[in-house]
Image (cartoon, rainbow, N blue to C red):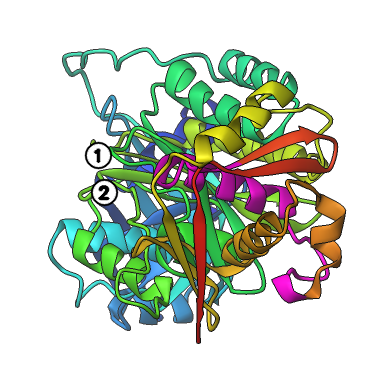
Amino acid sequence: MNATAAIGPEQLATMAELRPCLEGAIPAVMATVAADGTPNVAYLSQVHHVDEHHVALSFQFFNRTRQNLLAHPRSTVLVTNPLNFHFYRLHLKYLRTEDEGPVFERMKAQLAGIASHERLEDVFRLRGADIHQVLAIERVPVGKAPPLPAPLRRPEPLAVLRRLSGRLSRARTLDALLDAALDGLQQELGLSQAMVLIADTASGRLYTVGSRGYPTSGVGSEIAVGHGVIGVAAREGTPVRINHMTSAARYNQALADSLGRREAGAEIPYPGLARPGSQLAVPLLSAGRVLGVLFVESEHEMHLNHEDEDLLVALAGQLAAGIDLMHESEEPCGDDGAAAASAAVAASAAPLLRVRRYRRDDSIFVNNAYLIKGVAGAILWKLLNDHLGGRSEFTNRELRLDTTLGLPDVSDNLEARLLLLHRRLGEQCPALRLQKTGRGSFRFDALAPVELADSP
């Protein structure tokens, strides 16, 4: 007889009702049966939502549960809703094990958060993601119990998404687009810590172009694709959400390793929280390409739920499409001609800027302080040299045609690199100023005398 046949219609639940149970706050209990009929019950680290008809369970140990699954693929799993302590029994059928790909990487990142929270990093190692078909979801009666306090009411997701989408649709430049997204996350969702990173396919890194909620902006800081929550989201093209305290030392080490610095001090500090409780990284996908990552985090655990993830995935799609369409914006963003004319007068009285480039990675130092590197550094070096030759007006097209800059042939993200340079100069070296003047054109001014030096 089918074990699910005895479940009454009033006891059947949907995956939508089950989703709060799959946050990892309360361990699940899994029951399996051996080939000879001997039952086995064990705790389970993760039950991961795949789609409306499938879940993934964490495979960490080759134990009795694993042996039973391979011999008899049917099982039941008891999960708990941490908000109201309602219980649900999942009736499952084992299909396969995945040891790579988006589902595996999401579970791996989340398990790392759980492991570090419990100080069991060496014990919790994900071998694979066991994919199970959900045959039925059964509500488990628990008798009468005093009601729990209602959870805090959160903003209605579709209404928030509509307002955020409106903010993005009004942006006419890449600068305004990023500000609209980051400001909207703060004001509409109360997500105080957030950042946007753009992918550099040539170097295999992502660089920060905007952030909110940190003591320093971290504009220009980098992380390697595949490193940390952000890097995994970019590599796999899938959201990664962790709702448990992550290991600050391990995460920060991954960030330091990803910088690949070559000169002492040639780095921009990453702006993230030292001890995050919740993190969500969402890839910026457009036309099948990963353009970057939208990242939010909080000091509090269990702060980001599946509705937040769904909302940010939708928002990230619009943000990515906007980035793709705004390589060359129509909207000017800078000072007028009168302000530019006064720059030359001010420059003569300002302190000297000693600018040194290191050719091996185009690192730029101004008065011995690190400023920027990579393609953005190469662009700045070209602008400085041409400016000393008497030029102030430039076009995006000429930069794209300049083979010395190292721009990739496809998806060069030149607008994002120029925005990064513009923001980095504004923060660290305001005497060097880059301002857009129109479609595909900009002006570069030096408000101080400049001395250039080139090093290997």
Residue 408 is covered by the magenta coloring: yes
Q: Nearer the viewer, residue 214 or 230?
A: 214
Q: Position of residue 353 (x, y in %)?
A: 43, 55
Real-space Cα distance between discs 1 and 2?
5 Å
Q: Amino acid at mark 1?
A: Glu
Mark 1 or 2 closer to N-term? 2
Can you identify the residue that label 1 sits on? 301
Residue 154 in the image, given as x and y percentages of width and height? 41, 16
Mark 1, secondary structure of its residue: loop
The secondary structure type at the circle numbered 2 is loop
Q: Residues within 10 Å of mark 1 (few under 14, many from 20)?
A: some
Can you tell which quarter of the image residue 121 is in? bottom left
Find residue 36 and report its image quarter: bottom left
- In the image, 130 versus 450, the foreground residue is 450
Query: Which residue is located at x 32 percent, y 33 percent?
Result: 303
Could you tell me if the residues under marks 1 and 2 are in contact, i.e. CB atoms within 8 Å? yes
The furthest residue to the bottom: 456
Residue range corresponding to the magenta coloring = 404-433
Q: Residue at x 27, y 38 (%)?
A: 215
For the residue pair 363 and 170, the one nearer the viewer reads as 363
Residue 316, position as x, y percentages in the image: 63, 39
The amino acid type of the residue labelled 2 equals His
Give yes or no for residue 56 being in the magenta stretch: no
Percent coordinates x, y for residue 159 in the rendering: 60, 13
In this rendering, is residue 185 above or below 203? Answer: above
Query: Nearest the camera: 18 or 219?
Result: 219
- Which residue matches tag 2? 244
Left or right, 429 with reference to 338:
left
